[in-house]
Image (tube, helix red, strand yellow):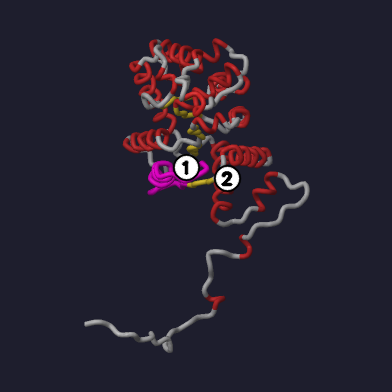
Amino acid sequence: MPFHYEEFDLSGVTTYPLKSRGGKVRIEDFARAARPGMTIGGLVESLPKILGGADFRAVVDALVDARRDGGGIVWGLGGHVIKTGLGPVLIDLMERGFVSAIAVNGAAVIHDFEIALVGRTSEDVDAALGPGRFGLAEETGRLLNEAIGDGVANGLGIGQAIAAFMSLREPQFARASVLAAASRLAVPVTVHVAIGTDIIHMHPAASGAALGEGSLRDFRHLVSNVARLERGVYLNCGSAVVLPEVFLKAVALARNQGIAFAGLTTVNLDFARGYRPQTNVVARPTATSGRGYSLVGHHELMIPLLAAAVVERSDGT
């Protein structure tokens, strides 16, 4: 039986006073206007205590607390973070004690290595692909594969192997290299690769056995690092697939051994929200304990701002 046209009767609708309702947005949480001479800390305090503004403050607090209390801070870095010139910022954080360990994908290693060796990186793929030159710089492929092969043969992971290479060779631009600084400061570096994703896998010197064994060894090193983050912070910056997947498995193994991660803070920082980082870094590891945050913005803007905020806050405590 079809319905017919009939206006709904609103005469019995009840209302209530606006002031009795409350609300998620309050005027006391609003941003404050910038003023001349404002410090980074003042800028952070001026942010609205709403959504991203509140999350950014919470991440700053978590990093400062983790450093002060020895909770540990592990940074997961994709290649984009390195090739946008953030090495000096990350090195400064290492020197100040805001980096307990670093996990990177293969692209991050390649960009960092090329920066250390010749002071530049990030080839023009469109220009190089047509003539068949893409990814075939001789020194990048030969030296990195040699470093990995030699290191793995001596019982090292890929991260240790390349850090040892950096320490031995002392490349001309090592001062801007995150891996060289990690070697100098004894900060563990783990490298997590998928075979065929990185240009050094195209080189004749590439060894699947060395890459596989070294990356598996580094995965187990990462599990040990993540297992120490009961009251610490894990940040995923610029890796959309590999590092979020690896981190989730590291959390699973640590939980299997009874680690609850009650005070864990996870952060994904990228210019867009992706499924794996949001699920495997922010949501799943903190679903039953801890807290996850997603900060959206360009690495070359957000990481220096975050670093400046935690350094100023730490110096003032």
Question: Which corner quadrant holds the C terminus?
Answer: top right
Q: CA distance from mark 2 to mark 1?
A: 13 Å
Where residue 173 appears, as percent x and y from the top left, is: 62, 18
The residue at 59%/56% (across/down) is 49
Residue under label 2? 61
34 or 65: which is nearer to us?
34
Question: Which corner quadrant holds the N terminus?
Answer: bottom left
Residue under label 1? 266
Residue range corresponding to the magenta coloring: 269-292
Q: Please, what secondary structure does the residue beneath circle 2 have?
A: helix
Residue 208 in the image: above or below residue 279: above
Residue 255 in the image: above or below residue 51: above
Quarter holding residue 145: top left
Where residue 244 appears, as percent x and y from the top left, is: 41, 37
Tell me which amino acid carries mark 1. Thr
Quarter holding residue 117: top right
- Farthest residue to the bottom: give it: 11
Residue 30 in the image: above or below residue 315: below
Instruction: Name which of mark 2 and mark 1 comes first in the sequence.
Output: 2
Tell me which amino acid carries mark 2. Asp
